[in-house]
Image (spheres, helix red, strand yellow):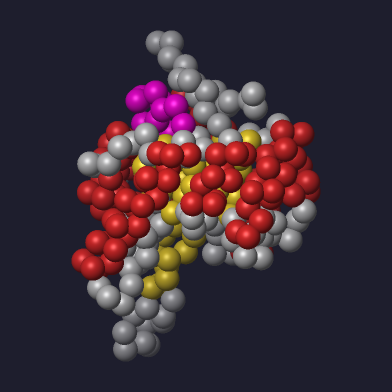
Amino acid sequence: MKIQTTASVALGVFTKPWRDLSIDELMKMVSELGLQGVEFPVRPGFQVEPDRAESGLLELTTIGQKYGVRVLSVAADPTEVLLASCAAAKIPVVRVMADLHSSGYLLSWKEFAARLDQWTRWAERFGVQIGVQPHHSNLIADSAELYTMLKDRDPRYVGAIWDAAHDAITGREPEVGLELVWSHLIMVNLKNAYYRRVSGPEADQSEWQRYFTTGPHGLASWPRIIAYLQERQYHGPICLTAEYTAKELVDPLVTRDVHYVKQLMAAVGIREEAFA
């Protein structure tokens, strides 16, 4: 049976591990990895800091064009100035996560929802989406909580960034998680993790650690994820988050993951999107 080819998908990487590279070196590295995009952290200590977002993001996108690399999103505090700067640089998404504060889960949820209301007003004004990503130990930890937060919000301005590892370590099957957030899905994060016991049998109480690993070796099934995206004709970016517990091995590990996801995409007929 002939496999139907999905619309092309842009493959990107989160550039957090390479804060010491210049923007030119960074974009060249991403291009040489065979990727079409980046998610970029606009944070203190990185190549573009919040207080120079307007000029810095324009420089980032301009240098990216030179290497055929798009800025798919930024990870940043979504201030009014930042969203305006993203709009000027034609960066479509600002990624956020919701922290659980000492005030407790329910109050933290309400506080985050109020902030999201404000960000949505700016998103509508500037034409930039807010993307919310779950994260372990935080307020929104998996796709079910993300669905609850976003289900009544306008997906033109607020979207879901589904994360393979964080859904998997909560025990959720990828097809279920993706279905829950599908109406708002704007990006898929591919990373992987498992729980590793770090205490020996002599310990009075066992201790466990989340261990972030390569695509084939964690709780999230990347082949099932890619197959589901093909089945439902996904039309958004896929971001390799380059998050590994063995941080000193990030370069060879992310290279392996790029090859792995490209093989999975090719097997089901998903094509990579070239820079336009």
- Of residue 80 and residue 6, the one placed in the foreground of this image is 80
Query: Taking 207 as reference, is 258 above or below it?
Result: above
Count of number-bearing discs: 0
Where's the C terminus, which quadrant?
Answer: top right
Residue 138 colored magenta? no
Name the residue located 37 percent from the left edge and 46 percent from the top edge: 120
The x, y position of residue 62, in whole percent, is 72, 38
- Of residue 73 and residue 11, the one placed in the foreground of this image is 73
Name the residue located 60 percent from the left edge and 50 percent from the top edge: 40
- Of residue 63 and residue 164, the one placed in the foreground of this image is 63
Where's the N terminus, which quadrant?
Answer: top left
The x, y position of residue 199, in whole percent, is 41, 80
Residue 226 colored magenta? yes
The x, y position of residue 175, in whole percent, is 30, 38
Name the residue located 33 percent from the left edge and 42 percent from the top edge: 174
Query: Taking 145 as reference, is 73 above or below it?
Result: above
Is residue 123 visible in the rendered image? The answer is yes
Query: Taking 47 as reference, is 256 above or below it?
Result: above
- Of residue 156 and residue 210, the one placed in the foreground of this image is 156
Whether residue 168 sits left or right of residue 190 in the image: it is left
Whether residue 197 sits left or right of residue 12 in the image: it is left
The image quarter in which residue 171 lies: bottom left
Name the residue located 32 percent from the left edge and 89 percent from the top edge: 204
Whether residue 79 sits left or right of residue 253 in the image: it is left
Is residue 214 visible in the rendered image? The answer is no
The x, y position of residue 20, in whole percent, is 74, 61
Q: Main secondary structure of the magenta part?
A: helix
Magenta stretch: give its range: 222-236
